[in-house]
Image (cartoon, rainbow, N blue to C red):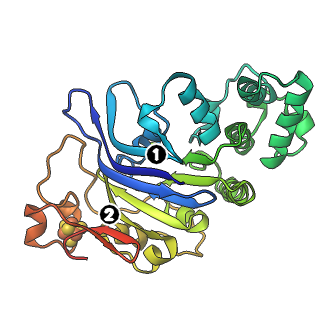
Amino acid sequence: MPLKVENLKISTKDGKITPVKNAFLTVEKGERVALVGESGSGKSLTALSILKLLPENLIAEGNITVDDKNVFKLTGEKLRQFRWKDVSMIFQDPSASLNPLIKVGEQVGEAIKFHHPELSKKEITEKVIELFKIADIPEPHKRINAYPHHLSGGLKQRVCIAMALACNPKYVIADEPTTALDVTVQGKILELLKKISERNNVGILLITHDMGVVAEFAKKIYVMYAGYTVEHGTVEEVFSNPLHPYTEGLLKCSPTLSGKPKRKLPSIPGSIPQPNEKISGCPFHPRCPIKKEICEREFPPAKWKNGRFVLCHLR
Ligand code: SF4
Ligand code: MG
């Protein structure tokens, strides 16, 4: 049973703003999936809603299930367990995820102790070292005693990855995990996540605005625009034959599947609408190079064909 998001809508409690209007995605165990879009597309909120970590003023509707669990119904101890054992998360800035005053080994140890209070101090340390090895942290025996500021950005992110794996989760959500890192470190972190996914059969949902990262990492892709999932398919299919004009725009200015150069999101003319902006018809029409008159009037139909999805009148 996969991690599944269906008909997700996220709005402010007063109902005035709806940053996520209709999003969906599925991640199977051991699968590497990318969720892509410009900032403001709703991808991070979608991720946070999977862990019930949305800011107080937002509410989510729809269906989110992980294996047989209805995420919306989880509370208290069940939710706490869920956040480590079912789905864990890695954030963009490792410095913000770590406590600067506590040795990194202890921080990872805390996560283990939380869930395995029966383990002795020695057993916990052994487990931390094991996790540091999995995260390819060199000299783990030494590094467990380091404070975050002793470590490079890449090493800090590896500690966060070790922490995310502390309770053997089935799924890991990584929100722009390499954006704050050097280009040379980026590839290595992606390699590590790939290895973990394969070895531990962990499903990984990688959130990124970078098509180069998608090409390097994922097998499946979901593209979001203005709170909607607008395209879905395998990375191979979508890169060789994008259906949605937005995806096409993203790819046009991006490196090819094998290409190296890392770039920010390309400049598609115009900008993503504000969450409270009312746009008639297709939300992409003000920026779409191939729009027709119907696009300004009618919301596009959701089309599924051979496992691919597109939200567009013309494709
Ligand atoms: Fe462009 Fe029309 Fe398709 Fe929207 S529905 S993406 S405006 S062609
Ligand atoms: Mg974000």
* Picture coordinates of residue 242, whole percent (x, y): 38, 75
Residue appearing at x 61%, y 30% in the figure: 81
Residue appearing at x 75%, y 42% in the figure: 155
Check the image and name the residue furthest to the top: 101
> Label 1 belongs to which residue?
65
Pointer 1 local density, CA inside 10 Å: few below 14, some 14–19, many at least 20? some
- Please name the amino acid that badge 2 sits on: Ile
The answer to whether residue 40 is seen in the rendering is yes
Above or below, 252 relative to 32: below
In what element is the residue under mark 2? Answer: loop
The answer to whether residue 253 is seen in the rendering is no
What is the number of the mark on residue 77? none
Classify residue 136 as left or right of residue 248: right
Q: Quadrant of ligand 2?
A: top left
Label count reads 2
- Please name the amino acid that badge 1 sits on: Thr
Classify residue 270 as left or right of residue 133: left
Determine the image quadrant of residue 80. Answer: top right
Pointer 2 local density, CA inside 10 Å: few below 14, some 14–19, many at least 20? some
> Label 2 belongs to which residue?
268
Give the quadrant of the N terminus.
bottom right
Q: Earlier in the sequence, mark 2 or mark 1?
A: 1
Label 2 – label 1 distance at C-alpha: 34 Å
> Along the line of sight, which residue is nearer the eye, 206 or 112?
112
> Along the line of sight, which residue is nearer the eye, 72 or 16?
72
Residue appearing at x 58%, y 34% in the figure: 83
Residue appearing at x 19%, y 33% in the figure: 16
